[in-house]
Image: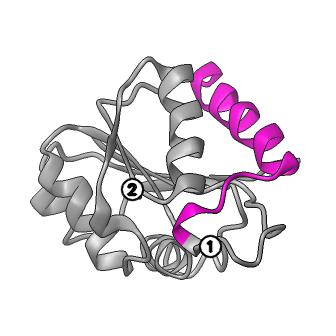
Amino acid sequence: MTKLVLVRHAKSDWGDPGLDDHDRPLNRRGLRDAPRMAARLAESGFRADAILSSTAARAAATAGHFGGALGVPVELQEDLYGAPGSVLLRAAAERGVDSVIVVAHDPGLSMLAGALSDGGIGHMPTCAVAIFTWDDDDWEVATAVAPQSWSLDTPD
C-alpha cells in the first residue's frame, strides 16, 4: 500500500513586512494548529516512513510538529519551496518508501490535492492534512493512476 500525505504549512506571521517570505515564522494560530493536527494524525494510527518539507521557516516548523508526533525525522528539501504539484509528487515518489508526508505551500499543494482527488479538494487551507492511498506498493503505479481513497482533515 502506498500513502501520500499532503500538509499545507500552518498559518504564518505577516507582522514584519521587511522579512523575506522564506523566513516568515508561524503565527499564534499556526503554533496552535500544527501540533493539534500532528497529534490528530498520530492518534489515527497513521505511520509515516518519511517526512519531506520545504526549507521555508513556516513549513519546516509545521513539519517539525508532525515529525515529533510521529517519531520521524524531517528531511528539508529546497526544491519544495513554492513547487508545483508535479515536483511535490515526484519528491515523494523518489523517496522510495511506502508512506510519505510532504509539507509545502500553495498553490502547488492545492493543485496536487485537487488533481489526486479528482476535484474533490478545491483548496487546502493552512495546516490541512490530505491523505491519499493506493492499494499498490509501487510509486510508478501510484503516480500514474488515481488513488483508491483520499481524505481531508482541516483545523477546527
Q: Is 99 located above or below residue 22 in the figure? A: above
Element type at mark 1: loop
Q: Which residues are magenta?
A: 22-45
Secondary structure mostly seen in magenta is helix
Residue 60: image x %, image y %? Answer: 50, 47
Drawn side of residue 2 relative to residue 8, left or right: left
Viewer-nearest residue: 79 or 46: 79
Marks 1/2: CA–CA distance: 15 Å
The verdict on residue 36 being magenta is yes
Few, some or many residues within 10 Å of mark 1 (<14, 14–19, 20+): some
Question: How many labels were placed on the picture?
Answer: 2
Viewer-nearest residue: 100 or 62: 62
User: Based on the displayed image, in which of its 4 quarters is residue 18 positioned?
Assistant: bottom right
Residue 6: image x %, image y %? Answer: 48, 56
Residue 45 can be seen in this image: no
Residue 36 can be seen in this image: yes
State the residue at coordinates (36%, 60%): 147
Drawn side of residue 133 relative to residue 127, left or right: left
At label 1, the amino acid type is Ile
Residue 35: image x %, image y %? Answer: 70, 32
Asked whether the beta carbons under mark 1 and mark 2 sit within 8 Å of each other, the answer is no
Disc 1 marks which residue? 121
Element type at mark 2: loop
The verdict on residue 103 being magenta is no
Disc 2 marks which residue? 148
State the residue at coordinates (65%, 71%): 19
At label 2, the amino acid type is Gln
Residue 46: image x %, image y %? Answer: 49, 27
Drawn side of residue 99 relative to residue 119, left or right: left
